[in-house]
Image (cartoon, helix red, strand yellow):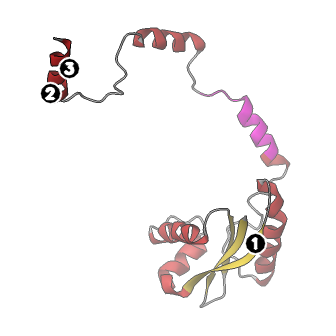
Amino acid sequence: MAVIYALKCLVNDFAYIGVTKSKLAKRYREHRCLCNNNKHHATKLNADWNLYGEKVFEMVVLEEADYSHRGSHCEEEQKWIDHYAKQGKLYNGHERSSGLGGETSLKGVEAAKKVIGKRWSPEANEKRRLAQLGKPKGHGAKISATKQAKKKQVMI
């Protein structure tokens, strides 16, 4: 179940349109945290948040949608983005649904698949594996003196 929501300013009727599969309260907390730290990507939203305060913003459910994959809700989200953009009351920095990627985004995905990046070669992996053989798997944790003493007692 996905929720298409609007984070609305009650003073000027501007809205930020978004979609979430998680709980709406959690998503609101994320927006609030970003705005309180001046890190929200919607700069006009952040400016109004600082100007008017948190109390004049509310989260409104616009639509609930059942979908099996990320792309199926995008048309509905785009409908709401277009609605607020037409009125000139959209906080979103883009007038395109986050899931509606054009050819450029598909090309970007294909390019990302081809890039290997800074990964270990199979030879380097084997060398690292052989270097670790026989070493305890303590994951860097120190063994306390008490545990070391108990280990010695068990061995004796």
Q: What is the secondary structure assignment of the residue under circle 2? A: helix
Query: What distance separates the C-alpha of mark 2 from that of mark 3?
Result: 10 Å
Q: What residue sits 55% from the left and 81% below the top?
A: 48
Q: Tell me if label 2 and label 1 are in contact, CB under 8 Å.
A: no
Q: What residue sits 59% from the left and 75% below the top?
A: 44
Q: Is residue 62 visible?
A: yes
Query: What distance separates the C-alpha of mark 2 from that of mark 1?
Result: 58 Å
**Which label is found at residue 125?**
none
Q: Tell me if label 1 and label 3 are in contact, CB under 8 Å.
A: no
Q: In the rendered image, which quarter is residue 78 located in?
A: bottom right
Front of the two marks 2 and 1: 2
Q: Nearer the viewer, residue 13 or 27?
A: 27
Q: What is the secondary structure assignment of the residue under circle 3? A: helix
Q: In the rendered image, which quarter is residue 77 located in?
A: bottom right
Q: In the rendered image, which quarter is residue 123 located in?
A: top right
Question: How far from the left and from the top, in percent, is residue 155?
Answer: 20, 12
Q: What residue sits 41% from the left and 10% below the top?
A: 133
Residue at mark 2: 145
Image quadrant containing the C terminus: top left
Residue at mark 3: 151
Q: The residue under label 3 is which amino acid type?
A: Lys
Q: Nearer the viewer, residue 12 or 59?
A: 59
Question: How far from the left and from the top, in percent, is residue 108?
Answer: 76, 42
Q: Which residues are magenta?
A: 106-117
